[in-house]
Amino acid sequence: MKNAIVAAVLILGTCTNILASSKSVGVNHALISEFESIAPGQTFTVALFLDHTDSFHTYWKNPGTAGLATSLKWTLPKGFEASPIRWQVPEKVKMVIYDAYGYNSDAMLLVDIKAPEKLTEEPVTLKAKAVWMACGPEPKQCCNLGFQDLSISLKTGNKPKWDDKGRSLIEEARKKLPKHVKGWKQSAKRDGEKLILTVRNSAGLAVEEDQEICFYSELNHFTTLKKQISKVKGDDLIITLPIADYAPEKLEQVKGLIYHPSGWHGSKGNKYMPVSLRLD
């Protein structure tokens, strides 16, 4: 744990705004629905829209060693249920000099809401407490904790009615969700303080070597204070991941996305390959 503690001290030492209570530094926010009127038993999607300003960014579900993932805590009318956030694919971001995972461009974080089988005739209000961290390109601009109580009111009726603007924005956001990539085999094994992730095309198609290849782990098991190493050996793409000293002693799962800037063969240009493997 020693290295992790040292890293945390260094990171916090550069973040002069870590205790700031600002609600809007570096990001504008809104809660958006694809429907303006909902029906009993309907499942529909709402989104937290994070509009980044002046080169600021926020963080993905696993920011890496530095950063804070955006979160939503819902207060819903009786009988309503909310899914976990469905995260669009991430990008590399920087917290000062440290690598992290997040969104340099604007982000739409999607949540599916299920209405109960019985609804009142009155409008319903969905409430959520949103928390995020917005960081800019300069040390004095990092670690702005944002938090806001958000709400959206929806009409009810026997037939749902689209919100045209919200529908368009959410449909575009769905295009940035991870998608299954066919025709690839994956395996992983631990080698001391490293994990070796291997990917091969089932049809023997070559993998183009690229220094920007990156594995975005959904689980905070790998440090982002050290570089990942990727190389092509024969038909295999081999990615070496440095295991963090704060990771569980026994890794049981590898889960995340492998990014290839040229896209994966057979995926119609899809650049992100989902990975979900059990480790012995």
Image: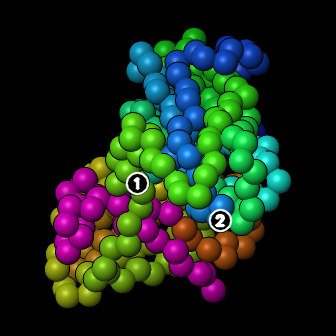
* x and y percentages locating residue 41 in the rendered image: 65, 65
Tell me if mark 1 has few (under 14), some (14-19) or many (20+) residues whose alpha carbon lies within 10 angstroms of its own: some
- The CA distance from mark 1 to mark 2 is 22 Å
Residue situated in front as seen by the camera: 254 or 196? 254
Residue at image coords 19%, 66%: 268
Which quarter of the figure has residue 248?
bottom right
- The colour scheme applied to this rendered structure is rainbow
Report the disc number at residue 237: none
* x and y percentages locating residue 86 in the rendered image: 54, 55
Q: Is residue 202 left or right of residue 151?
A: left
Residue at image coords 40%, 54%: 174
- Say which element carries label 1: helix
Say which residue label 1 marks. Answer: 174
Look at the picture and state if 249 lies above or below 106: below
Residue situated in front as seen by the camera: 118 or 202? 118
Residue 67 can be seen in this image: no
Asked if the stretch drawn in magenta spans residue 274, the answer is: yes
Say which residue label 2 marks. Answer: 41
Disc 1 marks a residue whose amino acid type is Arg
Which of pointers 1 and 2 indicates the residue nearer the eye?
2
**Magenta residues (range):** 256-280
Disc 2 marks a residue whose amino acid type is Gly
Q: Is residue 201 left or right of residue 19?
A: left
Label 1 or label 2, whichever comes before in sequence order = 2
Look at the picture and state if 30 lies above or below 22: below
Position of the C terminus, as image quadrant, is bottom right
- Say which element carries label 2: loop
Q: Residue furthest right?
A: 78
* x and y percentages locating residue 31 in the rendered image: 58, 35
